[in-house]
Image (spheres, rainbow, N blue to C red):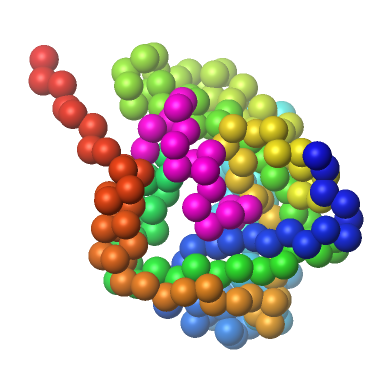
Amino acid sequence: MKSKITDKILGYHYTNPKAYHSMQTNGIDGVITLNFDNFAGLIPRKRFIKLGYGNGLPDEAHDGIIEGLLEPEPKSWLKNPEFPNFFGRLMGNICRKEKVILLSFELKPKDRAYVVERAHVERRLYKESKCQGKSTKETRNESFKKYWESRVPVFEYDGSYSAPQLAIWSGIEFDRLKVEWIKSSSKVWTRVLRNGWYIPQKIKIK
């Protein structure tokens, strides 16, 4: 069922103390950020699709976004039958710093917030990791095209995606951010392992 425009929808974003401190000042640690030099908060900076990929897509497809989730620990990411270790790999990247911070924020109609189907990209990466075929430029472009075309405004999302990801093309002001918790990376990673969200893959020796 689609959300009504008046429904309350929260976004969640994992970060670290250094990045969180940067959110409290304008820009990104003194780096020129074009439209965000006078903006304090969560800034869209990671390209949705890297330059050179997704042939023929509009420029917006290569703009920076804020990556997030609709739940702190989405069930569709924890035990995804198509992509084992999906959530575990995400947390493995996040736990590279000493501490982990979970932020939440209420989404508003003014936000350029969308839900996208991450499975379009993961499906290609997963096949590569399992040696089930190497991507060509054409297959990668097709995956990124599907990824881009899967965008649904967050207030219209019907819950049908197998690996929903939040992608926001606008900034979230600092006063809208709420710290849900701050934990050591070791504690977060231990929880991942204890719950079986990451199972080390056996390396086949030929």
Look at 38% across and 32% down and name the residue there: 84
Look at 40% across and 69% down and name the residue there: 100
Look at 83% across and 58% down and name the residue there: 7
Q: Which residues are magenta?
A: 68-85
For the question of whether residue 170 can be seen, the reply is no
Looking at the image, is 27 positioned above or below residue 194? below
Rendered location of residue 101, percent (x, y): 45, 71
Q: Main secondary structure of the magenta part?
A: loop
Rendered location of residue 98, percent (x, y): 30, 71
Look at 35% across and 44% down and name the residue there: 197
Looking at the image, is 38 positioned above or below residue 83? below
Left or right, residue 204 beside residue 62 = left
**Quarter containing the N terminus:** top right
Left or right, residue 155 beside residue 138 = right
Rendered location of residue 131, percent (x, y): 32, 18
Direction bottom: furthest residue: 25
